[in-house]
Amino acid sequence: MMAQSGRSRVVIVGGGFGGLEAARGLAKAAVEITLLDQRNYHLFQPLLYQVATAALSPSEIAWPLRHVLTRQANVRVVMAQALAIDLERREVESTAGVFPYDHLILATGATHSYFGKPQWEQHAPGLKSLADATELRRRILSAFEQAETADPGARPALLTFAIVGGGATGVEMAGAVAELARDALSRDFRQIDPSLARVLLIEGGPRVLPALAEDLSAYAGRALRELGVEVMTGTTVTGLEDGRVQLGDQVIEAGTVIWAAGVAASKLAAELAAEHDRAGRVKVAADLSLPDHPEVFVVGDAAAMLSDGKPVPGIAPAAKQAGRHAARQVLAQIAGRPTEAFRYSHAGDLATIGRHNAAVQLGRVKLTGFIGWIFWGVAHVYFLIGLRNRIAVAFDWLWSWLTRQRNIRLIVQHRA
Amino acid sequence: MMAQSGRSRVVIVGGGFGGLEAARGLAKAAVEITLLDQRNYHLFQPLLYQVATAALSPSEIAWPLRHVLTRQANVRVVMAQALAIDLERREVESTAGVFPYDHLILATGATHSYFGKPQWEQHAPGLKSLADATELRRRILSAFEQAETADPGARPALLTFAIVGGGATGVEMAGAVAELARDALSRDFRQIDPSLARVLLIEGGPRVLPALAEDLSAYAGRALRELGVEVMTGTTVTGLEDGRVQLGDQVIEAGTVIWAAGVAASKLAAELAAEHDRAGRVKVAADLSLPDHPEVFVVGDAAAMLSDGKPVPGIAPAAKQAGRHAARQVLAQIAGRPTEAFRYSHAGDLATIGRHNAAVQLGRVKLTGFIGWIFWGVAHVYFLIGLRNRIAVAFDWLWSWLTRQRNIRLIVQHRA
């Protein structure tokens, strides 16, 4: 059933990298697009750790979806939470009513997985949303404030920061927290020496940044240690309470624990009437559609995507390519053409280590040190949406590079 | 009793304009200063309305107190909430322990007064803190989002914004909300026309901006009407429930109500064992000390200050002058000199009306229109702390002036 206009109704759930790219891929199509998101902004998640560590402001990495798409007349943006998908009736139920569709693109992303221990989340928040990032910023900055007035005996625990997970997010958080303590905060306290803060990076596998080549992992490990981070590989968290991390026999008193491990598909994807992998990701066909519902596509972290039979990594470029691919398949279906398999093109992997160092792998090309960091910085500024955010982020990075300061040191306690 | 060092202990409660200026006024003194604040930042309150209306980011008008005072070695900044003051024992009780003092400077500011109806606050939040400002921003932007998906019959109420109080804050909020609807949001919606939003400014007295001359009040009223604001003077709010404002016989359905009326001294000042005026402000002697406790000074909005027998207005320059004055009186007392009466020097009053208009009164000089706005802008940028914030604010103003956009359109729902 078509809309009254005779145009196909395309509903996209999620305005992240996958969903936004899907909407843009349909810009010239004679379709009626509804983009549903529970937030009013597109978030540039790769820089979220900089909000959590007081280097960037939330508004510098977020942009109103409505404004991004204002000139694309065939899109209607709806700020609402999608509650359930009825595959038989072809409807999305949401907090703003029911949206029937002819084609559905599900791009709802992922949350952290606490390995079956959801109670750990309150002790170790993750880093997926702006609210997460400002909450982590509050906890990190508050730890120093509390240590300043605490009994000397309580200070070491308050000034211990444990980061769980040695992927890109964990490595970037660990480097940023260590530098925050050593540079930006070092002279502002009277009773404590912030540069004595202990930063632990806990990784279950044998090396940090497992997506990169072994020599780059080793480089990143050395660079983190030079910043004062204690890198603990082959170490698994077995217990977590307020202020205490259990690592097998070892107990570490850490006032702040940050979770950067494990991925689980969003609730909406995990509850979809379809097959899932262990992380709750929807198993999709080669063209990213549901095997029994060719009109439904799942892209990005919500899907267990394959390319040439190999798993596609859960990173922003993959979500963007998948969103663009889904848009093309919708156009093919409307035109009566067969769909095509998704082929992911991997550009590279990269992670910053502190303020002017990074590990970058682009195929066989490897960049490290300041050159790596410049590449990382230019790439990230380039992919930000909007000239204003590019200028603002570049200005903040230049400023903190010149002054070694962090500009956004706000502890904001929000009302319940 | 002196501190062990033999130096006088000065405790300052509150790191706003008054408290920060008091600390700076003691920079060269041989005293031990403890500055207590429940927040970790100094807030430039006059620009809070720009955070609430998505024009500036919280970090642009806030600066870590610790960092502001990092080079002043005789100050210790403590992030803690002061709970009570024991005037006899000369102690401040706080969430970080008890702080004994030889001299106390109380600069805890004011909150809104709901004229004996505290239950109104939940329906009409005020604008005193960053959390207030981001909550108002969330409500204002969410109203447009909700209207977009609401039944057509529900839209007019959702798109009605009532601002209570016609002082500078109310006038600035009304102008900024009207322009947000008319310019920044006007093209981003598909179902509603944001420029049809109704903005009401409700003032109990006969004119807006009562602190300014009558002709400037009249000018501001006309300028607001040109922006589409309905200015209702001589109108008192008699009832307030969710979505409804009662004005005597008249009931207005308004989805968003913003409180910019009435001032009440902070709880700590109102509970001090001293005489108070009806707003809870502490009645101070001519030198700003407590009549029975010459070692205690109360400055800024927490005090009912007089200068030559006339009330001193509750604005930032008055708080700064009072903080500076209190610091000088502490120095006089330590040196065994008599204290002096506070003499307030009034530079002027000013308020913006929308994006490039303002009403400014500097003694006999009156500025309006774009010239007034330029004066207002330069004055505000000049008084911001830190070069980085001055550049960032100037950049954001220039950008939004060129593009008519608001950059910080984020609806962030914080965790409880």
Image: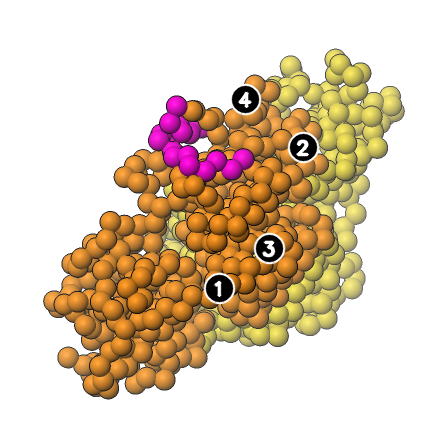
Chain colours: A yellow, B orange
Q: Between residues A115 and A172, which one lies in front from this camera angle? A: A172
- Same-subunit check for callouts 2 and 1: yes
Q: Residues within 10 Å of mark 4 (few under 14, many from 20)?
A: some
Q: Identify the element where label 2 is drawn.
A: loop
- Give the residue pinned by disc 4: B154
Q: Which mark is residue B189?
A: 2
The chain that hosts pointer 4 is B
CB under 8 Å between discs 4 and 1: no
* Residue B96 on image: x %, y %: 27, 63
B238 magenta-colored: yes
Find the distance from the CA under tag 2 to the CA under tag 4: 16 Å
* Residue B260 on image: x %, y %: 42, 45
Q: Identify the element where label 4 is drawn.
A: helix
Find the distance from the CA under tag 4 to the CA under tag 1: 47 Å
N-terminal-most mark, 3 or 1:
1
Q: Residues within 10 Å of mark 1 (few under 14, many from 20)?
A: few
N-terminal-most mark, 2 or 4:
4
N-terminal-most mark, 4 or 1:
4
- For the C terminus of chain A, the image quarter is top left
Q: Residues within 10 Å of mark 2 (few under 14, many from 20)?
A: some
N-terminal-most mark, 2 or 1:
2
* Residue B184 on image: x %, y %: 66, 43
Q: Residues within 10 Å of mark 3 (few under 14, many from 20)?
A: many
- Give the residue pinned by disc 3: B368
Relative horizontal placement of residue B20, taking residue A111 as reference (left or right) = left
Q: Quadrant of residue A325?
A: top right
CB under 8 Å between discs 2 and 1: no
A211 magenta-colored: no
Q: Between residues A221 and A196, which one lies in front from this camera angle? A: A196
Find the distance from the CA under tag 4 to the CA under tag 3: 38 Å
Q: Identify the element where label 1 is drawn.
A: loop
Q: Which mark is residue B363?
A: 1
